[in-house]
Image (spheres, rainbow, N blue to C red):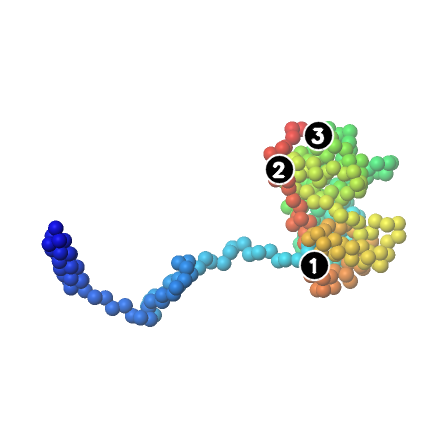
Amino acid sequence: MLGWIVGALGVGALAFFLARSLVPKVQVPASSVAIHATAPSEIPFTVPPDKPTLLLQAPESEHPKPPEGPRLAIVMDDMGLKSTALTRALPLPITLSFLTYAPHVGTQAAQARAAGHEVLAHVPMEPFGTMDPGPGALRVTQPSAEVTRRLAEALAPFGPQLAGFNNHMGSRFTADSDSVHRLALAVRARGVFFLDSRTSRASQAAEAVRAFGGRAATNDFFLDGGSEVTVQSVLHNLDRAARLAQMRGSAIVIGHPFPATLTALESWCPDAKAHRGLRFVPVEELAIGDSEGQKQVLSP
């Protein structure tokens, strides 16, 4: 048995020797190989110097990370009846919301969009009390078809300039559950977003729009809602808006084209952008949908 093993080893050794002698030797330049005691994913790929270099890395993302910093959207309501705000040097991107019954509203909206402003339609809705919200108002007694028809008529003059719409007055309409359900259906059909002006703390509008699969945003407070509007009072509220955006990451506020409001905005916005790190954004960037709402869409 021992002799058979020695003989077998001798044959194997002879075969190995013949194989080594018959295979030509290949000289690889030392400079072309780099070996490191690293994990496989970290071993660099190298080629001889006279060969083109192969870059083994992913290209830069086509969707770069968005700029960081607190975001603030400022909306100017009640536009269209006077052209004062359009002739002032409003900081961009202030959002301009035009009353739907304003004269030549389509032309005014196109001019605002060409100047770089986001454009909204300011749709009149029924308030509590006896105040008249204006022609074409949405009211709680209207059926769904009438709400859809009136909204379509209100938004039609804006054309492609329109990003979304918000309510003018509307404290009663936005607090009525049946009415906001009808509104939400119309919003989803139009494919635009809705900004709840929050003229009532009882408003259900934004939540209803999201529940029906639409996009909505909510006003945090009004810059000039007090009985006496001064430059100082607006500046104070702008500072509040900045603190809210810094604390929460974003904020939305609404003002009106009063001389005091416009003057405050012109002086405050450049300084806030430079020294507070605020990013002024269109409302649409902050309008969100309810991912669960897509699964819970209610029938009309």
Q: Name the residue under label 1.
A: 278
Q: What residue type is labelled 3?
A: Ser
Circle 2: residue type: Glu
Which labelled disc corresponds to residue 144?
Answer: 3
**Separation of disc 3 and disc 2 at Cα?**
23 Å
| Percent x, y of residue 173 | 78, 35
Residue at left 63%, top 32%? 297
Q: In this view, does 86 lie to the left or right of 191?
A: right
Residue 121 shows in the view: no
Image check: 184 left or right of 17?
Answer: right
Residue in front for this viewpoint, 196 or 91: 196
Percent x, y of residue 123: 75, 41
Disc 1 residue crowd, few under 14, some 14–19, many 20+, Cα 10 Å: many
Q: Please tell me whether mark 3 or mark 2 is closer to you in this view.
A: 2
For image coordinates 74% across by 64% down, the residue present is 271
Viewer-side residue, 195 vs 105: 195
Residue tagged 2: 292
Amino acid type indicated by mark 1 = Leu
Q: Which of marks 1 and 2 is nearer the N terminus?
A: 1
3D distance between C-alphas at marks 1 and 2 = 31 Å
Q: How crowded is mark 3: few (under 14 residues within 10 Å), some or many (20 or more)?
A: some
In the rendered view, does 3 fall on the left or right side of 115?
A: left
Q: Nearer the viewer, mark 1 or mark 2?
A: 2
Q: Is mark 1 on a helix, strand or loop?
A: loop
Front-most of residues 91 and 19: 19
